[in-house]
Image: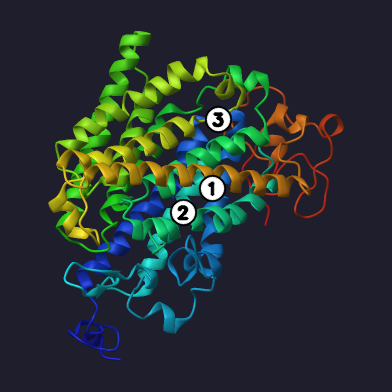
Amino acid sequence: MDASTAYRQVSPAVPSWLNKGDNAWQMTASTLVALQSMPGLVILYASIVKKKWAVNSAFMALYAFAAVLICWVLLGYRMAFGDELLPFWGKGAPALGQKYLLTRARVPESTHTLEDGTRETVEPWYPMASLVYFQFTFAAITLILLAGSVLGRMNIKAWMAFVPLWLIFSYTVGAFSLWGGGFLYHWGVIDYSGGYVIHLSSGIAGLTAAYWVGPRLKSDRERFPPNNVLLMLAGAGLLWMGWSGFNGGAPYAANIDASIAVLNTNVCAATSLLVWTSLDVVYFGKPSVIGAVQGMMTGLVCITPGAGLVQSWAPIVMGILSGSIPWVSMMILHKKSALLQKVDDTLGVFHTHAVAGLLGGLLTGLLAEPELCDLILPVNTRGAFYGGSGGVQFLKQLVAALFVIGWNVVSTTIILLFIRLFIPLRMPEEQLAIGDDAVHGEEAYALWGDGEKYDPTKHGRNTSLYGEETAQSPYVNGARGVTINL
């Protein structure tokens, strides 16, 4: 075929409805969000935990990314963005057929009536394949964020069962209800890019999972230093920069609203980081790199539900609040709450995602600017500070948050209790004591150890992929060598 065919204005590969700019940006945004997870959160998790859990933490994120993609194209996408089964759930079906993926993207249940009486459906100017992959990256990062609550003790086999079940029975419900044309979407609830669908869900489900899985060892809870602060910053940097695709891709187009969303995202993150760091200095007498990363995270989460809908002074206000309110909940209220003290949320996902996501959703109900809302939302919408029906909007945001919280508590509990019938949720004590070497037969750093190694005569038997009993990974030759066995 003549190469010039691909550059024709209209051809079989360039249908008349395709906007090349929108498609290019959507695929770029998808890649940026994917990089937040793989390798962003994989690196961050591997480095922010104690050395004994580096490999396990990274693997939990890596596994979730892969497992979610397969479940998403087999069933999940159309449960979240397909035809309605229930007011909060779509009909599951594969999203793999060529005929389906090469047609113009469409969210079928998003049809709404405009003021002039005409009916409109969300139909981006690019193929369904671009939308399927973009939304996969959101689903994947939600599970990976949730994993942060149970690092350092969840049975890896239980996690492998949990990921597809939670995706199907929890994530798709929130996504359909708020984005796919479900009852909250048509009621007018605002969730621009996942403050509720992703962050409130992962924070609440993470806390619930941490309760049922149980705590880490006492020694790990008391001392859990990051094994590589500089590498942690690399992962955090990928997370921050990738958020431009996270919020900038939400309008489904390379339009002016995407530009506002990207700017607002970065302003809020920077403000929140500075406020969190300032509070650390005032309260503890010195700045903390881990604290700065937490502040960055809460700022990114807080702006997400309203990134393209608020004026660009609002992210400064939101950043001040997201750098202080989650700080107070994590550093002060957490220590005074018997429930939060009992539940071992390893990375504080409840504070950085549930608290910050709820805060952002409610602030959006106050600060959503009418003209910006008109750029992207299907019905006339405004925050409470702009008068009119804004007060009702704030109440809608609150009710939607309660629905997301309730669904995630119940669904996560049922899923884990079901898994517990077949697989222990928590690792056995001998694996908890040793960590990566016992769970995977691998360690993060081959040239440096930190104490006791896995001893099959003392801690049980370990079998390699090839059947021989060994304390080492089948990919490691020698005590701490890195030779690959082929």
Residue 10 appears in the rendering? yes
Q: Secondary structure at mark 1?
A: helix
Q: In the depicted view, which residue is nearer to us: 102 or 413? A: 413
Q: Position of residue 382 (x, y in %)?
A: 20, 48
Q: Position of residue 203 (x, y in %)?
A: 48, 38
Q: Is residue 4 above or below residue 141?
A: below
Sequence-first tag of 2 and 1? 2
Residue 241 appears in the rendering? no
* Tag 3 residue: 345
* Quadrant the N terminus occupies: bottom left
Q: Is residue 445 above or below residue 406?
A: above
Q: Which mark is residue 407?
A: 1
Q: Which residue appears at 49% of the width and 20% of the height?
A: 334
Mark 1: amino acid:
Trp
Pointers 2 and 3 in contact (C-beta within 8 Å) = no
Q: Nearer the viewer, mark 1 or mark 3?
A: 1
Q: Position of residue 433 (x, y in %)?
A: 72, 26
Residue sticking out furthest to the bottom: 1
Q: In the depicted view, which residue is nearer to us: 136 or 195? A: 195
Q: Is residue 14 above or below residue 213?
A: below
Q: Position of residue 214 (x, y in %)?
A: 67, 31
Q: Which mark is residue 174?
A: 2
Pointers 1 and 3 in contact (C-beta within 8 Å) = no
Pointers 2 and 1 in contact (C-beta within 8 Å) = yes
